[in-house]
Image (cartoon, grey):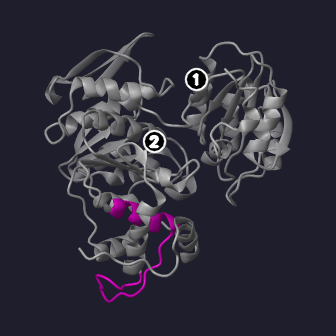
Amino acid sequence: MQEIPLPPHPQTLEEWLAHCERLHPVTIDMGLDRVQRVARRMDLRFDCPVITVAGTNGKGSTCAMLEAIYCEAGYRTGLYTSPHLVHFEERCRLSREAIAADQLLPAFAEVEVARRGQTGDDGQGEVSLTYFEFTTLAILRTLSRAGLDVVILEVGLGGRLDAVNIIDPDCAVITCIALDHMAILGPDREAIGYEKAGIMRTGRPVVVSDPAVPQSVLDRATEVGAELWRIGLDFHFAGDKQQWGWATHPSRGGRRYSGMAYPALRGANQLVNASGVLAAIEALRTRLPVTAQAVRNGLALVELPGRFQIVPGQPTLVLDVAHNPHSVAALAENLDAMGFHPTTHAVFGAMADKDLAAMLERVAPLIDRWYLTDLPTARAARAEDLRSALEAGPLGRGQVAGCYPDPLQALAAAVSAADPADRIVVFGSFFTVGGVLQDGIPRLAAKHLAA
């Protein structure tokens, strides 16, 4: 295929991303018509199995475990996930490595040419794309030409109308469904579940790893004729403090894994995610065979920054992108299980459209001192607004230590105040965790976090 030359401008990834931000009048514009039109002009397609993962929480962990296991099985993997923590290139991974920025540039140029109607002209003129739609198309194009054996796609928002859903998956995975983005997806779990269920396809497997799955998801599976794999019925897990096991129902082949070490990703919720991962691998086994050793190795070696990530040292530093009531409740459960720390310091920043009261209700009793931070996006709540939410609600035993212009300064204040036996938890948003990972673990904290 003839290579499409880069236009004079943009010439760098940063310039392309700035260009994408200017194209569309709104940040989120749900619907597939525009993005499908450009994808058709690009003749976008995959020649290998595709797994699409939707859900409210657990998507990133599920994708990371799928990637790790398939890599350990010797397959060339491609992964698209969003948002990123620090660098945009994190969104596109080839065989567990983030792609280099310059490798994305040809695909951005191709999307721009197709968007303008200069290739695959359908007579419908120029198409306006959101930042997410444009960048999704660019990453999908990059993955489609990378000679991969399996592609894993994380849905950005919802499912039915998300740009990722222009690709027909060979297997769909739906993780936990909880209340988030309710202004867009609907007021309750049934409405949100319906949106997530939009990634199902007729005759193809859909793995549901939510133990309390909404009826709307089950109804949609029946309506489209998807092959439903449901946790607790088609597969299940059990574990003790040392190890865990997983098995499918005899009607699903009766495969069993026993005596497995816990996944490298921390947190009680990871066994639910890992169970869904193993079901998806089983559902695709005829096309992508995987050995038991690859499963064990993949789960032991999987890495995903910012998901109950514990940085060793004194004081202990915990990083978690928990940003809705359900994920914050899981964070609180995991903090409870860590053991005694004299004082818990929290660096907290969040989006303004979140249910702050519900987020804080469960975790506030565990926090002694709050360091509230502004975030570098117009969607974020101001630190002073977070202070008001805390003081109006369940402040628990804690006190607000201060408000700060960015997460790094908030962390610096927490580190200065913490004793070696204390712990610091950074949570509330990808922007909050990403803000303290700009240069790895910040140098300002190094002497306090020294092992």
Residue 227 shows up from this direction: yes
Question: What residue lies at 84% left-to-right and 35% top-to-bottom?
Answer: 400
Work out which quarter of the rendered image holds the C terminus and state it. top right
Residue 111 position in % (x across, y down): 40, 73
The amino acid pointed to by label 1 is Asn
Of 62 and 303, the residue lying toward us: 303
Mark 2 and mark 1: Cα distance apart in space = 18 Å
Q: Within the image, what quadrant is residue 414 found in?
A: top right
* 74 displayed left or right of 29: left
**Residue carrying label 1:** 334
Of the image marks 2 and 1, the number of the one nearer the N terminus: 2
Q: Within the image, what quadrant is residue 165 found in?
A: bottom left
Q: Secondary structure at mark 2?
A: helix
Determine whether 269 is above or below 163 in the image.
Answer: above
Determine whether 316 is above or below 214 in the image.
Answer: above
- Circle 1: is it few (<14), some (14-19), or many (20+) Cα within 10 Å? some
* 15 displayed left or right of 428: left
Of 15 and 322, the residue lying toward us: 15
Residue 4 position in % (x across, y down): 34, 77
Give the magenta range.
116-142
Q: Which mark is residue 60?
A: 2
Question: What residue lies at 59% left-to-right and 42% top-to-bottom?
Answer: 324
Question: Which of the two discs, 2 and 1, sits closer to the camera?
Answer: 2
- Circle 2: is it few (<14), some (14-19), or many (20+) Cα within 10 Å? many
The amino acid pointed to by label 2 is Gly
Q: Within the image, what quadrant is residue 146 found in?
A: bottom left
Residue 371 position in % (x across, y down): 79, 37
